[in-house]
Amino acid sequence: MSSPNNQAPEAPRDRMNWGIVLRALRHRNYRLFFGGQGISLIGTWMTRVATAWLVYRLTGSAFLLGLVSFASQIPILLLGPFAGVWVDRLNRHRVLVVTQTLSMIESFALAALALPHIITVQEIIWLNLFQGAINAFDMPARQAFVIEMVENHEDLGNAIALNSSLVNAARLIGPSVAGLIIAAVGEGYCFLIDGISYMAVIASLLAMAVAVRRSERAPQSVLAELHEGWDYVRGFRPIWSILLLLALISLVGMPYTTLMPIFAGRILHGGAHTLGFLMAAVGVGALIGAVTLAARRSVLGLGRMIPMTAAGFGAGLVAFSASHWFWLSMLLLVGTGYCFMQQMASSNTILQTIVEDEKRGRVMSFYAMSFQGVAPFGSLIAGTAASRIGAPYTLMIGGSLCICGAALFASQLPILRRLIRPIYVRIGIIPELAAGISTASVLQEPPQE
């Protein structure tokens, strides 16, 4: 390692600085979006924690925790395919302005009911259904709009990773602040702050200069375009395999967030501040994972990261379910958050890279369905199971199933590499493949120089 021949490769690593990590911020529109989202997402995470704690405080019911989460996510599954069609048809920038404005109204409605202490679980469920319907359009629009903000494929993966970093920086700050605010003055002020925070992202969207995106073909009927999008997703195995694994993780793994108040209160014998710290630990790990992805120069290696980190996420859940010590639980959640972020963001980057642009909205709607659309069933199942066999056993089973899904995906990697190779060659992401480099490198790390 100390010989002169070994020093040449170190120079590129030395230049792996913040300029590389933040390169997508060179694009003005993405820079505006990044700043506005940074403020808004803190409020969003405060609302998530406050909602979970409010339901738990009012009812003490694991089942109702699952039901509220179900209500917030089921519209994504029901409306997602149709939302994807409209996202491909409409101006995605304008769609985001509308969805963010409606989300702001929903947060203010929660605050108006919670501050005078008149809110009920039924009202929380109805407002979460409304927010879920908004998210059904917001999520695919947001994902599809990234390529319009960064303008080229070279910075796409970095922009996705930076967005994930932003989400998880907010996950780190939001729950911690929410725990303190809930303990001091109650949940209603979290909702109020969230509503105000939406003004930042709305302002950033309105400040953008966005080119009008024109479709090269006349639109078909909604059902025809929906069927076309489904055939495309179902017929291309890399997309289908990635979405299936993501759906499994969301169904059996992600409900750990729904059960977190139970672990904070009954297992670790804490309160709202304990819940905030646990969620913040997940955010620390996820933030580290996202920054690591942002520092990558290439999509090479992301394919094998998907099953590796999916298995790591499952193992983290199994270990967390058996912990009765606060600091050990915090440490395990850091690793769990890291693995989940790596798996989710790697999946997103590969999908965004290989998808045809005219179908991007529809594919990302299926991504939203896999990521959040099936999660309500997982939350409902987890809440029901936890009320019968306990939260630790429920989480242990879910983590084990994640590991099994990761192993199945890993067995398909050779086939997926062969199918993705022509796309990467065509768009020039890895032009060396055209010179005859082995297909085995497509989804693996590039050879060290």
Image (cartoon, rainbow, N blue to C red):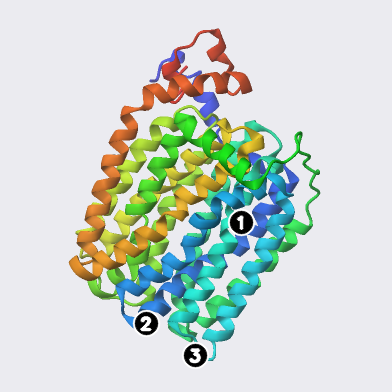
User: Mark 1 and mark 3: span between their CA atoms?
Assistant: 30 Å
Label 1, label 2: how many angstroms apart (C-alpha)? 30 Å
Closest to the observer, 25 or 339: 339
Residue topped by disc 1: 138
CA separation in Å, label 3 and label 2: 12 Å
Q: Report the residue marked by disc 2.
A: 57
Quick one: 434 or 284, which is closer to the camera?
Answer: 434
Residue 262 in sight? yes
Q: Where is residue 198? Give x, y as percent.
A: 65, 67
Figure quadrant of residue 116:
bottom right
The answer to whether the residues at label 1 and label 2 have Cβ atoms under 8 Å apart is no
Q: Which residue is drawn at the image coordinates 52% and 60% (left, top)?
A: 170
- Residue 319 position, x and y percent, is 23, 53
Q: Which residue is mark 3?
A: 117
Would residue 391 be found to the left or right of residue 153 on screen? left
Q: Amino acid at mark 3?
A: His
Residue 177, compared with residue 248, is above or below; it is below
Where in the figure is residue 313, as x and y percent of width and height?
A: 33, 47
Structural crowding at the residue carrying mark 1, measured as other residues with C-alpha within 10 Å and reported as few (<14), some (14–19) or many (≥20): many
Q: Residue at x 45, y 80 (%)?
A: 122
- Front: mark 1 or 2: 1
Q: Residue at x 58, y 33 (%)?
A: 355
Q: Is residue 272 above or below residue 79?
A: below
